[in-house]
Amino acid sequence: MQRWDNSPQKSPFGSTTAQTRNLADPNFACGNPLIQNQLIRGEWNSKAFVGTDYPVATKGTDLAQGTEQNMPGADPRTGKKSVWDQIPQLVRSGRIPLPVFEQALARVLYQEERFGLLGCNDSSASCSNPGGVNGVRDGSAALPTGSPDSGAVIGTKNGHAAIAEKSAEEGAVLLKNDASNLPITPTDLSSGVALSGPLAEYNVGSPNNESSGGYPDRSVINTLQQIKTFAQNKNAFTYSPALSPSGYAVPSSALSTSSKRVTGGLHRTGGPGAPTTDRSLDFTTASPAGALGKGNYTWRGYLYVPSADTYTLRTQSTKGSDIGVKLSIDGKSQKASTPESVYTGPRPGMFPMDMSTTRAGFTTGGLSNSAYKVGNLSAGYHAISVSFSNASSGKASFRLAYSRTEGDISDAAEAAKGKSKALVFVGAGNTGQLTDPANSDMVPGELPAEQVALIKAVAAENPNTSVVLNTPGPVVTSSWIHDVKSVLEMWQPGQEGGTATARLLLGMANPSGRAVTTWPKGSEDTLFSTAQNQGLFPGDATGTHPERVGGTEKSTGQVPACETGKVCQGEDAKLSGPTAATGDKNYTGSGYAAGFRSNGDSLRYQVSPGTAGTYMLKVRYANTLRSSRSLRVAVDTGPAKLLPLPKTGKRGNWSISQVPLRLTAGPHTVRLFRSGSDNSSGNVNVDSLGLTTPGAHFPSTANSLGGLYECSVGVTCEIERGHISGAGIKTTVDPKGYTGEGLLAGFTKTGDQATIDIPSDAGNYTLQLRYGNPKATAQTLTVDIDGKAGKVTLPELSDQNAWGIKTIGVKLSAGIHKITIQRNSKDSGNVNIDSIALTTKGARYPARQVGSFGIYAGYRYYDQLGMAVQFPFGWGLSYTNFAYSKPTVTATKDGGLDVTYTIRNTGSQAGAAVAQVYVGPPSERPSGVEFAPRALAGFDRVSIAAGASSTVTTHVDPRAMQYWSTSKQQWVRTHGARDVFVGPADKPDQLRHARTP
C-alpha cells in the first residue's frame, strides 16, 4: 500500500502504453479519461477507486482510462459476458500495460485495507486487524449481539442498530409544524391519537436489493409497535389499516347469517365447536378470541355491503404446509394472490417490499398474508363461504379481513374524529407508484391518488392532522399541504426506521435533518418543464426546455408534448409502470404501452391547446379480457374522470374510447392511469391517443418502425453526436449560438464526414441543415442519404456567429436511413455544421435546443428565476426555534473566509441547528461569467441547549470564491466584495447578511 500511496495519481502511461481517447470524441463515463484522471485524480486529488454500476463498461480497455472495477454479470446491452473478462488477455498482449493493471489493483486494495476488509492471517503482534468475526473470515459468522445499552458502536448487532437509529432520526426532515402540532404530548395521549395508513404498519427498512439488507428481525419492527411501547399507553392509539395489506378484520356489522338483515356473524358449520355463530373470524394470538385448535373449519353466511365499493378480501394464517384456506363469494371460488406492495424500490416494478407476511403491532406478526381481488360489489348481501384447515398438532391463527377503496378511507376519517391528534403514514418509492414521475430523480411526483384521498379525508375530520412521509425524494404536496398541520419526512429510514419514527413523533428525539433538494410546488416546476418568462443567462431562451432532461434525444425523464389534432403514440409517452411492447398486431408507431397492472401505473403527455374550451381525449386501446375495463384520466392535479374500455375481442383488435376534457389555453399534463377503484386487472394496452375538438375523427397515422434510434424525425439531431471521421473536421464550441454540446467545424479536407442514422416511415420529407458560413462566398458540401449523394450549396452569412438553415427535399422509403454530411474532392468545405433535422415536408426547423442550464442547477435555478417553491433547499424545522445574528466575515490566509455568527436556541428544549453559509456574486463580475444569486459555501451542525447561545465560525473554502475559466482552463479568483448570507435555509427572509472585506 505504501508504494502506491506515494505514487502519482495520474495513470503511468508513457510512450509505449495505451493512450487516452481523444476528448473531442464521445466517451462513456467509465472510459472518459477527462473525468477519471484529470478531474477525479487530478483536480480532486482523490485516491478512490472507480467502479461501474451493473456491467456497463463498454471496453476492457476502460481500465486504462481510469475505471478499476466493473460489476459482475452479463452485459445488459448484449447479453454476452462482461467485457471485463477481456482484461487478462489485454494485459498479456500489452494493450493494457502491466503498471496500469497493477495501479488499478492497488487502488482497490488500498480502500479495502482502509476499511478493514482485508485483515491478516498471521498471529504476530503486527496483526492488529485480523478481520472477520472471532477468527471466521468467510462472512458466515454473525456479529455478537452486544449490550442494548452500548450505544452507537461498531462491531455488534445492537451497536449497529443504534447507529442506524441515530442516522434515521438525524436525517428526518420536519417540513411543516404549525402551532407545534408535533410532538405528541401526554395530554394528547389522554385524549387519544388516531393512526392510519400502511406505513405505520410496514417499516421501509430495505426497499430494494441494491442496499444493505440489515437485520431482517429489526427491519420488520414498525412505528405502530414502537409508538405504543415508548408511550407506555397502547390504548391511547387507534389504528385504521386503510390502504394496508393487512386490512380490517371483517366486523360483525358486515357479517350475517341472513340475506334480509344483518345478524352480526357467520355460521360455523364445520370444525370444533360447530354449530355456532362467530361474530368475526379473527382468531389470532393478538385477538381476544385466540387461535384455533386442530380441525377443519367452515363458515357460511353473507357479507353485507352498505354501498357499492371495490373489495379485496384478505386472509392471514399461521404459515405451514398443514394449513389450508378456501374462500368463495356469491358461489364463485376466489383465487389467492400475494398482496400488492405498499412500497417498491427505486425502479418501477422491481424490488417491492414483502407483503406476504404480516407485521406485529396490529395483528399477529409473521402470518401468511393472502389477497382475494373480488372487485366491485353492489350494495346488499353477498353469499360468502370460508374454510380453514389446521392439520398441525397445535393451535393456528386465522383471520378474515377486507379492504375497500372508499370504505377504508371513510372509516379512517371517522376514527380520527374527536381525537387529540391524527397521524397519516403514507409514501411511495418509484415512478410506478407515484402518479407523476420521481425517482426519475428529475421530476417530483405526487402521492398516489388514494393516499391523497386518505390524507384529505382524515384532515377534514381532525384539524390536528400530521402526515408522515416515506419517499426517496421530494414529492408534490400542493394538493393537501394546506389541509394538515405537520409533515415529517422520514425518507427510506432503514432497519431502525420504525423505532426512529416513533421516537421523533413522541419527542424522544428532535428532528434536525435538512432538505438536500428544493421541493417545488408542482411537478412541472423543473428546469426543463417550467415555462420560463426570462432566460437564465444571455442567449438562453424563454419557455420550456425539454432538451435539458436528455439533450435532443428521446428521454424517459420528461413528459413528451402531444400536439392538438395529432396522433401521439402510447409507447412514446412518459410511462410509469406500463412498458413499451410490440407483441400484439396492428399497432401504430413503434409499439404500444402495455400493462397498467398496478395501482398508479400511468401514461402521461403534455398538451397545450391554443384556446380554452372543451376537447376530446381519444384513446386507441385493446382489451382482450372477457369483461369491460377502465382507466382514469386526470389533467394536472385536477379530479380524475373514468375512461371506460369495453372488451375488444381477440388480439390485434383495437378500438377507440374517449372522454371530454375542459381545458384552458396553455400547457397541461394529461395523465392516463389505473387507480384502485378501477375494474382493471392488467392486460390493457394503449396504442395511441389524440386530443381533438369535439366531433373530430381520431387523428390518422401510418404504421412505423419497431425500433428506437439515436435520432428521429421531427427533432434536432446534434451532428457532433454522430460518427465523425476526417483530419479536417473537429468538434468545437466556437462560434457561439450552437445547440447541443457543440458543433462540427472545418470540413477542410476531402473525406471529412459525419453520419447520423434516422428511422422514418415512407414519404416525402425535408432534410434541414443548420450551418454557419462566415466566408464571403457560398460554400459547398455533399449530402449522402443511403448511398445517394448530392451537392449542397450553403450561402454566405452575415458574420461569424450567424446561423442559417438549408433545406433539401427527399423522398424516403420506410426504414433506417444513413445520412452523411461530407466533403468530397469537388466541394469547397470550410463551413460549420451545428445540427440537422429530418422533418415532414413544409415543417419548420425544430425549436432551438439548449443543451445546458449552465451553473443554474438545483436551488440555483429557482433562485435565478425567483420562483416560489414549496420548501427551499436546506429547509428543515425543529421542535425548538433558533435565531441567527451578528454575522462577520474575515479573510483567511488560504484565500477563503471565516464567517462568524451567533445562534441562540429560543425554544424550551435542546436541539440541533444546521447553519448554512451562502455567497453572492462578486461586485466586479468578469465578462461572460455567470454567478448564482446565492451559492452554498459551507454549513455546520450545532447542538444547543434550550435558552443557550453558540458562536459558530464556518470556514468558506477558497474554491467558493473562484470560477472556472474555460479560456485558461483553470480556477480564477474573483475580484470585488461579495455578499455573504447566514441562516437555516436558502430562504431570503431567514438569512442574515454580511459582506466580505
Image (cartoon, rainbow, N blue to C red):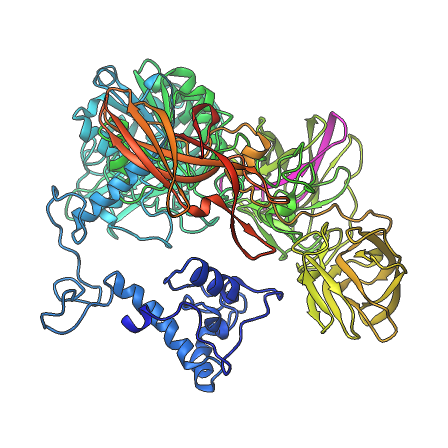
Left or right of 130 in this view: 39: right
Task: Identify the magenta region.
Answer: 598-627
Q: Quadrant of residue 648?
A: top right
Give the x, y percent position of residue 276: 23, 28
Left or right of 869 in this view: 635: right
- Kindly identify the residue that appears in the image at 73 percent across and 46 percent down: 848
Out of 849 and 943, give the one closest to the viewer: 943
The quarter of the image holding the C terminus is top left
Give the x, y percent position of residue 783: 83, 66
Give the x, y percent position of residue 929: 60, 44
Report if residue 127 lies within the magenta region.
no
Out of 480 and 568, give the one closest to the viewer: 480
Q: Is residue 818 visible?
A: no
Left or right of 586 in this view: 280: left
- Kindly identify the residue that appears in the image at 71 percent across and 54 percent down: 586
Out of 533 and 168, give the one closest to the viewer: 533
How many labels sit on residues?
0
Left or right of 11 in this view: 125: left
Seen as rendered, the residue at the extreme top is 418
- Asked if 253 appears above or below 647 in the picture, the reply is above
- Asked if 938 appears above or below 913 in the picture, the reply is below
- Asked if 403 appears above or below 157 in the picture, the reply is above
Give the x, y percent position of residue 637: 57, 29
- Kindly identify the residue that appears in the image at 47 percent across and 36 percent down: 919
Seen as rendered, the residue at the extreme bottom is 93
